[in-house]
């Protein structure tokens, strides 16, 4: 019984960790793409 609870807790932690990593990656890719585009008009 303890093994099943430990496995369930491990799966839940793995899902939360993977969701957090994907969310951080997607939010960090949105910002840097837009800012350099404004610099090309001044040259």
Image (tube, rainbow, N blue to C red):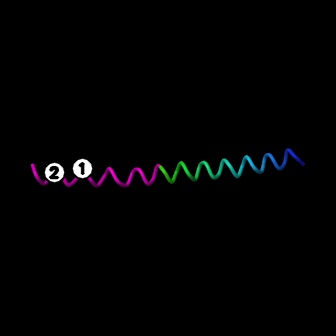
Q: Looking at the picture, how far across and down is residue 38, in whole percent?
A: 20, 55
The residue lying at 54 percent from left, 48 percent from top is 21
Q: Looking at the picture, how far across and down is residue 30, in whole percent?
A: 37, 55
The residue lying at 22 percent from left, 53 percent from top is 37
CB-based contact (under 8 Å), mark 1 and mark 2: yes
- Give the residues drawn in magenta, as a range: 25-43
Cα distance in 3D space between marks 1 and 2: 7 Å
- What type of secondary structure mainly makes up the magenta span? helix
For mark 1, what is the residue? Answer: 36
The residue lying at 39 percent from left, 51 percent from top is 29
Q: Residues within 10 Å of mark 1 (few under 14, many from 20)?
A: few
For mark 2, what is the residue? Answer: 40
Q: Secondary structure at mark 2?
A: helix
Residue 11: which disc?
A: none
30 is within the stretch colored magenta:
yes
For the image, the number of numbered tags is: 2
Q: Looking at the picture, how far across and down is residue 17, in whole percent?
A: 61, 48
């Amino acid at each position: 019984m303890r093994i099943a609870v430990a496995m369930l807790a491990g799966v839940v932690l793995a899902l939360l960790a993977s969701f957090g990593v994907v969310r951080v990656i997607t939010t960090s890719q949105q910002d840097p793409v837009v800012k350099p585009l404004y610099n090309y008009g001044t040259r």
